Image (tube, rainbow, N blue to C red):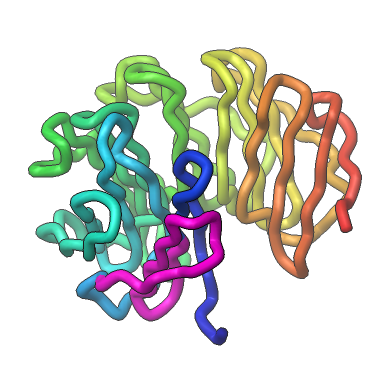
């Protein structure tokens, strides 16, 4: 239809969710044969959806500081109390209690925020302010990375209690980040940028992706094989850790 999907998230073999414009949340429990629309209690664009690891609950974040949660398969979503004015672009839980959301000012402002919960989302604490951030990835309860506007990269080894700001090889917007272990991670960005680290995010190098299209998502299955996707149905694949990329049909 005419709903622009922003994110899709798969749970196991048969269950998946998709979120997008107008507060749309779709759920399938039969490998996509049918999709049911779930009530989100918002009409704002939603950017990210992740599972609350260890439970059947899902978390969604989006514009105007919206953070939503459901209560398992087949349930609608509750709009949690707003904690911030920022547009929240990424959410992640590493267990039933501990999770983070990141966001930034509307438009091209420079201010942003990282929030953390240790009680399953009942309350959130501010862990970092000022950088305008788009997304994040945590490999465990301690090690994480957040990326955003103007090449911003922030890393933590303390569960988000303290953050470092390593030098970035680009000054353009960074949209997605993924780590396969505590050392190896990749970032994708606005003009086809792909960055790589083998030092846990303390240093980054730029790779050649062979596309100038925005790359909204990146995911690696191990240290060698990975995919990135973006504008104009762009899907690229690497089998050598990101050194070379091939456009997929």
Question: Which residue shows up at 26% across the image and 70% down it?
Answer: 40
Counting from the top left corner in percent of width and height, residue 86 is at 29, 60
Counting from the top left corner in percent of width and height, residue 11 is at 45, 43
Q: Up-down: is 15 above or below 144?
A: below
Quadrant where the C terminus sits is bottom right
* Residue 98 visible in the displayed image: yes
Question: Which residue shows up at 64% across the image and 38% down it?
Answer: 219
Q: Nearer the viewer, residue 223 or 125?
A: 223
Residue 35 shown left or right of residue 96 in the figure: right
Quadrant where the N terminus sits is bottom right
Residue 176 shown left or right of residue 59 in the figure: right
Residue 19 within the segment the image draws in magenta: yes
Residue 138 shown left or right of residue 94 in the figure: right
Q: Up-down: is 153 above or below 48?
A: above
**Could you tell me how many numbered marks the image carries?**
0
Residue range of the region highlighted in magenta in the rendering:
18-39
């Amino acid at each position: 239809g005419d709903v622009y999907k922003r994110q899709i998230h798969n749970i196991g073999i048969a269950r998946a969710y998709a979120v997008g414009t107008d507060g749309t949340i779709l759920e399938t429990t039969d490998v996509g044969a049918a999709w049911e629309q779930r009530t989100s209690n918002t009409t704002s664009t939603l950017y990210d959806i992740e599972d609350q690891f260890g439970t059947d609950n899902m978390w969604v974040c989006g514009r105007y500081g919206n953070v939503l949660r459901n209560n398992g398969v087949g349930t609608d979503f509750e709009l949690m109390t707003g904690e911030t004015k920022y547009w929240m672009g990424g959410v992640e839980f590493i267990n039933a209690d501990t999770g983070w959301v990141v966001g930034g000012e509307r438009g091209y402002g420079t201010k942003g925020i990282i929030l953390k919960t240790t009680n399953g989302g009942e309350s959130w604490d501010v862990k970092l302010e000022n950088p305008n951030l788009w997304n994040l990835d945590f490999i465990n309860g301690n090690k994480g990375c957040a990326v955003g506007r103007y090449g911003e990269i922030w890393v933590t080894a303390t569960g988000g209690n303290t953050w470092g700001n390593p030098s970035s090889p680009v000054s353009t917007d960074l949209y997605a980040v993924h780590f396969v272990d505590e050392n190896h991670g990749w970032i994708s960005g606005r003009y086809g940028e792909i960055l790589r680290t083998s030092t846990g995010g303390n240093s980054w190098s730029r790779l050649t992706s062979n596309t100038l299209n925005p790359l909204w998502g990146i995911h690696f299955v191990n240290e060698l094989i990975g995919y990135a996707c973006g504008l104009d149905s762009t899907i690229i694949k690497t089998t050598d850790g990101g050194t070379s990329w091939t456009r997929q049909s």
